[in-house]
Amino acid sequence: MSHPAIVSGGSAAAPVPLHEILPWAIFVGLLFVLALYFVGVEEGAVSIFNSSYVHEFVHDGRHLLGFPCH
């Protein structure tokens, strides 16, 4: 019985080219920066939203990551 990850002939799988990984890496990086903004910066002074709903939603995560908020 052959293993599904092994290509016939015993050769290893080809590496994924950088031009195929780069768009996904940029997308994940932008999502990370957006999440970091909402957890770390969205507090009221430079907030996108006028209410404190975002601040209260990420409040515990903010303290867990070491961002001061009061």
Image (cartoon, helix red, strand yellow):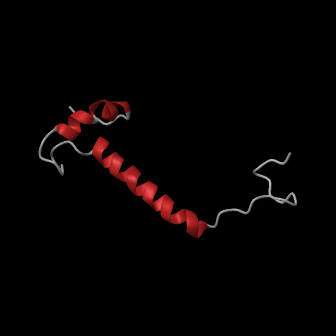
Please give the name of the residue rendered at 57% of the width and 66% of the height, measured from the top-left corner.
20
Seen in the image, is 47 located left or right of residue 41? left
Q: Position of residue 66 (x, y in %)?
A: 35, 34
Q: Position of residue 58 (x, y in %)?
A: 28, 36
Do we see residue 50 in this rendering?
yes
Do we see residue 69 in this rendering?
no
Say which quadrant the C terminus sits in. top left
Say which quadrant the N terminus sits in. top right
Q: Nearer the viewer, residue 16 or 61?
A: 16
Seen in the image, is 13 located left or right of residue 24? right
Q: Position of residue 55 (x, y in %)?
A: 22, 38
| Residue at the extreme front | 1
Q: Nearer the viewer, residue 51 or 4?
A: 4
Q: Nearer the viewer, residue 69 or 32?
A: 32
Seen in the image, is 70 located left or right of residue 35? left
Tell me which corner region of the image, top left, top right, bottom left or bottom right, holds residue 62. Answer: top left
